[in-house]
Amino acid sequence: MAVLRRFLWLLLVFFITLLQCFSISHQQQLPVLSSVERDSVFAVLAAVNSAVPWRRFFPDDLCSAAPHGVVCDYFYEFPNSTEPDAVHITELSFGFISDYSANPPCSSNSTIDPVLFSSFRYLRKLVFYKCFTSDVAVYLSDGDSPAFAASLEELVLVDNPSLVVSLESLFANFTNIRRAIITGNGVYGEIPERISDSGELEEISLSRNRLTGQIPASLSKLKKLKILDLSRNFLDGYAPESIGNLSELLKLDLSSNRISGRVPESYRNLQKLEFLDLSFNRFGNFGIPKFLSEIPRLKEVHLSGNLLGGEIPEKWEKLKRLSTVGFSSMGLTGKIPPSMAVHLRSLNYLGLDGNNLEGTLPPEFEFLKTLNGLNVENNNLSGRVPFSANFCAKLEGKLRLRGNPDLCVDEELKNVKNGSVLGKIKLCQQSVITQQLFLSGCSSFMLDSVKLQSTLLMAVFWIFLLNFFGVFEG
């Protein structure tokens, strides 16, 4: 038995040794990064942050030990290959984001080495996050297409105000790009028609740049597009009707531009849309688009800062998921429809401030369990605030009622300690309280008053009967 155990042990050691030898042999057969590509990586790293001794920190093959944001991949260049034939850089990400994404940090004088555009034919992802922030502009040349024009899938340029380049040259012949996140940079010019040639695009985020001109109708060619964010630029003209053909769109943000005209009716076709922000543009006095009630997946809608005018629609039945409504400073008139509170069961925030709304506050808002903010400041609302002390305390300072001189509160709400302005609103007169008691009866104060008045009326009735019969018998 001892001899058998020894034999099995020796056999196990033999197989482990054989496996290790095979592994070492396999590793030795893997290709290494070419010296040209390796030197190009170090040149780009030195331009981003020259204070770091990159070569000393990473002396070995960059594909086996590299900084966090430098990624390699192996390629099979021949159809019958069983082992990889080459290795190339496929991702370059610069700028410290967090401890979980510790990309090479940029310095205050970061620049871009031209080899970035000539040495990486297989690059799929390029990221610069808060790298170019000094007063000295960093220019991207408007020259030939980069070597990675056909391979790049993700371009992420975030908060690089010193990075100066026209959008047309930046999108030079990217045929396979899926995500273009270019926000907070010095990117200028018009949105080029060629952007629509990148048929794989799923996200275009170009917010906080210096873009001008009109939104090209050709964007409708991007059938896979899920996110279109052109906010906070200087775009003008009309919103293209053709955007309504982007059936996969989840987010549409055109806010803070100079877009005018009517909100296109074709947007009713965006049946997968969850986020719509057209706020702070120059859309005309055509009222709130009624087709909003026909987009069932909508979670947020922002139209503030456009003088659309008209009344708030009554139909909200299909918008069960709607959580945020921004209708501030829109020239709205009429009353706040109770149907908003009845049907918008997921409502978290409602902003109706800065309009010309009148009438009373619908008491139904109190029954929305998810509501955390209600702003109706600076309107012409009147009557008693119909909410309980518990509801007002739950909203804390997010119940905004100022600027409605004809609103009033009872003593119970006057003493709510929640950082709101309830204490600064006038007390209701008894006549106002009595009138509204018969109209609603939603709060505990109203219910108690109704019971008290009923009791008094019943007592008066019995006294009248007793006096009447006493006189009759006499």
Image: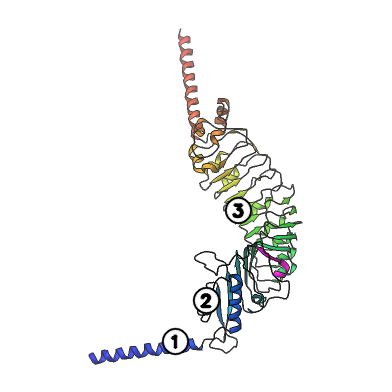
Q: Which residue is mark 1?
A: 23
Instruction: Mark 1 or mark 3: name the one nearer the start of the chain.
Output: 1
Residue 214 tag number: none
Q: Which residue is mark 3?
A: 300
> Which one is in front in this view, the residue at disc 3 or the one at disc 2?
2
Instruction: Mark 2 or mark 1: name the one nearer the start of the chain.
Output: 1
Report which quarter residue 310 is drawn in: top right
Tag 1 secondary structure: helix
Q: Residues within 10 Å of mark 2 (few under 14, many from 20)?
A: some
Quick check: is 166 in the magenta stretch? yes
Q: Nearer the viewer, residue 315 or 55?
A: 55
Q: Position of residue 450 (x, y in %)?
A: 50, 29
Q: Nearer the viewer, residue 112 or 190?
A: 112
Q: Position of residue 6 (x, y in %)?
A: 27, 90
Q: Nearer the viewer, residue 212 or 384?
A: 212
Q: From the viewer's perspective, is residue 332 above or below residue 265?
A: above
Residue type for callout 1: Ser
CA distance for labels 3 and 2: 42 Å
Q: Which residue is mark 2?
A: 66
Residue type for callout 2: Ala
Residue span colored magenta: 159-172
CA distance for labels 2 and 1: 21 Å
Residue type for callout 3: Glu
Identity of the residue furthest to the top in this view: 474
- Pointer 3 with pointer 2, Cβ within 8 A: no
Q: From the viewer's perspective, is residue 362 above or below residue 141?
A: above
> Which one is in front in this view, the residue at disc 2 or the one at disc 1?
2
Q: From the viewer's perspective, is residue 287 above or below residue 31?
A: above
Q: Position of residue 105 (x, y in %)?
A: 55, 67
